[in-house]
Amino acid sequence: MRTKTKYTLGLLTALMMLAVQPVWAAGPPAPSVFSNPLALTFIILMILLLVIIGILANILIGAADVKLRKKKKAGNQAALASVITLLLLLAVPALYAQDPAAAGTAKTAPGTIAGMSSSTFYIMATVLFLELFIIIALLINIKFLLRTEKERIVAETETPEERANKLSWWDRFNSLRPVTEEASLDLGHDYDGIRELNNRLPPWWLYGFYACIIFAGIYLWRFHVSHTGPSSKQEYERSVASAELKIQEYLKQKGDAVDENTVTLLNGADDIAAGKAVFLKSCAACHTETGGGNIGPNLTDDYWIHGNDIKIMFKTIRYGINAMPSWQSQYSNKQIAQVASYIKVKLHGTNPPNPKAPQGTLMKEEAAPATPAAPAADSAAQTKKVAMN
């Protein structure tokens, strides 16, 4: 009762102070805060929310069931919060006072919101949001206290059997049975104290199983009966083909789009120089720098163990053979083609000092094709010219 009297007195005091607020402004009378409809609406809302806060605070104190001393302390705290809120309300009209000369342009002046200064508007909005937040906090606490009290009353009144039969929403969703009915579910199988019960499968498991069956039927029809979708084999083949295209594109950009089936003899000066550098670095140890042969065979004569074709030489260098190592992990395909071309163009046919004895089979290089004969008309013209001479 005393707390309600405090709230009433505080509210009346605030209204009286709001009524006399315009007198405090110095100079000519300034427009009252009540002359702005939005400001008046904000003030009314703040007063109503303040009253609601007081009512909810009383309900919360009653629901908490605390001692009278704590009630008085809480009442004093609520009264203090009310006074602070009222002081904020009183500060708003003071901010609203302005010079009469500027009163006519208040609605169009920059930095105003609905005829009020932006600071006044934001202060009022902040007070409203704070009051709403306090109301929400009070409601949450009231709900929590009521639920706790309800649980306490239920715990005191319910019997152990009712407590054992009580199921949570998850248990009810899964159609589980209470503990007191375990005897009727017992199948008589006992494994080291673990009893087997005849519980039904949870609905979420059954529904998932049914969904898998439906999905399997649709999948079977589409991919294996109607063939409207690609099979796993077709998807694999498409992926491999796409990867091959990307590899070839990458090799083209890198300059390695060549293998034992597409390699050709390289006669360019840059390619020959690059092939010579690779040969001196990795091949000269077995074939000597001149190609005359040491551990490896002589590369300058016409005797070849594995063949003298550029494609065979490329394959031999790339993959290795017998005691010759594989070089594909150290050199690119283009570099292997360059060193094979260097052997064919620069080393074969030379006469190095102290060459190694011939090994393999004699393989003469094919003669270069003869130059095509001149057209018949040109031959006739040349014959006629000779006869005239």
Image: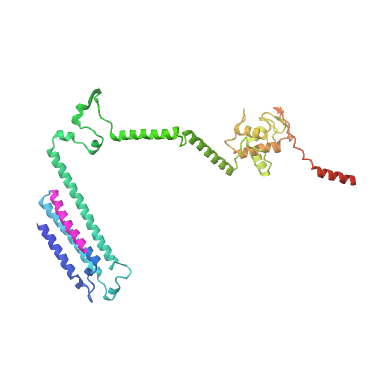
- In the rendered view, tell whether residue 252 sits above or below residue 48: above
Q: Quadrant of residue 11?
A: bottom left
Q: Quadrant of residue 339?
A: top right
Name the outermost residue toward the front. 226
Magenta run includes residue 267: no
Label total for image: 0
Q: Residue at x 68, y 44 (%)?
A: 269
Q: Nearer the viewer, residue 352 or 106?
A: 106
Q: How is the image coloured?
A: rainbow
Q: Residue at x 59, y 42 (%)?
A: 252
Left or right, 263 with respect to 246, comes to right
- In the rendered view, tell whether residue 387 sits above or below residue 40: above
Magenta run includes residue 62: yes
Magenta span: predominant SS is: helix
Q: Is residue 56 visible?
A: yes
- In the rendered view, tell whether residue 314 sits above or below residue 114: above
Residue 259: image location, x then y, percent = 61, 36
Residue 364: image location, x then y, percent = 73, 31
Residue 177: image location, x then y, percent = 22, 32
Residue 361: image location, x then y, percent = 71, 27
- In the rendered view, tell whether residue 299 sits above or below residue 73: above
Name the outermost residue toward the left. 1
Left or right, 373 with respect to 138, comes to right
Left or right, 207 with respect to 294, comes to left
Q: Nearer the viewer, residue 369 or 383?
A: 383
- Quarter of the rendering occupied by the N terminus: bottom left
Q: Is residue 280 visible?
A: no
In the image, which residues are magenta? 43-64
Q: Residue at x 14, y 40 (%)?
A: 154
